[in-house]
Image (cartoon, rainbow, N blue to C red):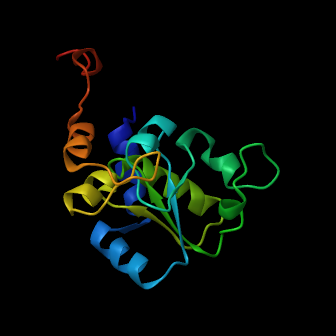
Amino acid sequence: MKTFKSLVEDVLTNINEIFPWDLDEKLNSTSDILLIDITEPTEYATVHIKNSINVPRGVLESSCDWGYGETVPALADARNKEVIIICRSGNRSALAAFTMQSMGFNKVSSLKTGLRGWFDYELSLYNEFEQEVDEDDADAYFSKGPAPEQMGPED
């Protein structure tokens, strides 16, 4: 039986990943990168990288393609453009990058360590009003863990 962790591990050797500091350097030298944040809307409203587009993981495939209510034209038209997929930790984005490669996206990468790594590298995060998120608020967001009932049975 596969677990979430094993699914992610399986795709890591088949995708490109980019570290936060390398992405920051790229963003400072070019504006021709599409940032796709696949977190849920409430997560995106709390913290995201400036100029990223929120495309929740649950609608990613239809957002990447033409002819759907979820189609995001900038994304559907980006099969030959550099696309960076972002999530909280780099796990969901790894799975999303693998899926997008299967859909013909030639220059897609996952942000290794995700938004957490971006924050740890002391790069700015923004809220739903495009205001920079206070360091304490971001730290509180990233400090949340699973509730006791989400930990599963003890063996």
Residue at screen point 46% across, 35% down: 42
Residue at screen point 45% across, 44% down: 44
Q: Is residue 50 left or right of residue 125?
A: right
Q: Is residue 63 left or right of residue 8?
A: right
Relative to 17, say whether 65 is above or below. above
Direction right: furthest residue: 67
Direction bottom: furthest residue: 29
Residue 32: x and y in percent read 55, 78
Among the 4 quarters of the image, the one containing residue 69: top right
Residue 20: x and y in percent read 31, 66
Viewer-side residue, 9 vs 27: 27
Quadrant (top left/top right/bottom left/bottom right) for the C terminus: top left
Viewer-side residue, 131 vs 21: 131
Viewer-side residue, 16 vs 125: 125
Viewer-side residue, 85 vs 46: 46
Residue at screen point 39% across, 52% down: 131
